[in-house]
Image (cartoon, helix red, strand yellow):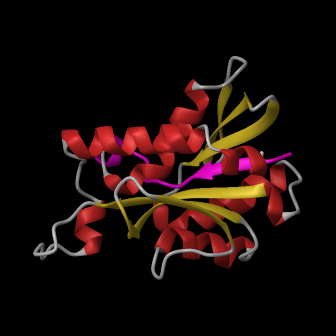
Amino acid sequence: MKVIIGLGNPGKQYAKTRHNAGYLFIDALISTSETPAQTEKKSFAIIAHITVFGKKILVAKPTTFMNESGKSVKMLLSKYGIKDLADVCIVHDDLDLVLSSYKIQKGKGPKIHNGVSSVENAIGKGFWRIRVGIDGRSKDSHISGESYVLQEWDTIEKKTFIDCIESISKSDQLKSFV
């Protein structure tokens, strides 16, 4: 079984922040499911069984905070007996990529991302990643990355981001993973 896990932070105060890019991606995938999504809340994650590109997959949003995502991912893989990391795809925000760009890669990630580091520490590094660019800061911006990711999207950024994740959800690269 293939699983796609979107990283983010639980709670209303984080729902509209850039750091929840992974959660937004999972929500978009659920909305395009070819069959009705069966969603349930389990220990450490909200999961859904969906059908995309004619294949049934599992999608999840950890309910642990971003920096402890590995705990949730490890429990989820154990519960569903997923041992091959090639069947796992982690979706996350990436400040190394500009807003509206993305990369789907195996075993490669941003220089620094505490959520991804937590996952790597818990399960290893051989999983797929969808790195979704969120950096829309101007060159003269002095805001730190840590502060920036926890800010809410502005209207234009959000629209640009939604268009990007819709493109990813229809991409041949994602289809190849599924």
**Quadrant showing the C terminus:** top right
Whole-percent x, y for residue 64 in the image? 52, 56
Q: Nearer the viewer, residue 26 or 38?
A: 26
Q: Nearer the viewer, residue 176 or 147?
A: 176
Q: Does the magenta run of residues contain 52?
A: no
Instruction: Give the number of marks.
Output: 0
Q: Tell me the residue at 56%/76% (across/down).
A: 117
Residue furthest to the top in view is 36
Q: Tell me the residue at 73%/43% (across/down).
A: 175
Rendered view: 31 above or below 177: above
Residue 94 lies in quadrant: bottom left
**Quadrant showing the N terminus:** top right
- The stretch of residues the image draws in magenta is 1-15
Side of 106 where 135 appears, left or right: left
Q: Tell me the residue at 77%/38% (across/down).
A: 57
Whole-percent x, y for residue 4 in the image? 68, 49
Rendered view: 146 above or below 77: below
Whole-percent x, y for residue 60 in the image? 64, 44
Side of 37 where 158 appears, left or right: left
Rendered view: 107 above or below 158: below
Whole-percent x, y for residue 18 in the image? 33, 54
Residue 150 lies in quadrant: bottom left
Side of 86 where 112 appears, left or right: left
Side of 34 where 28 appears, left or right: left
Residue furthest to the bottom in view is 111
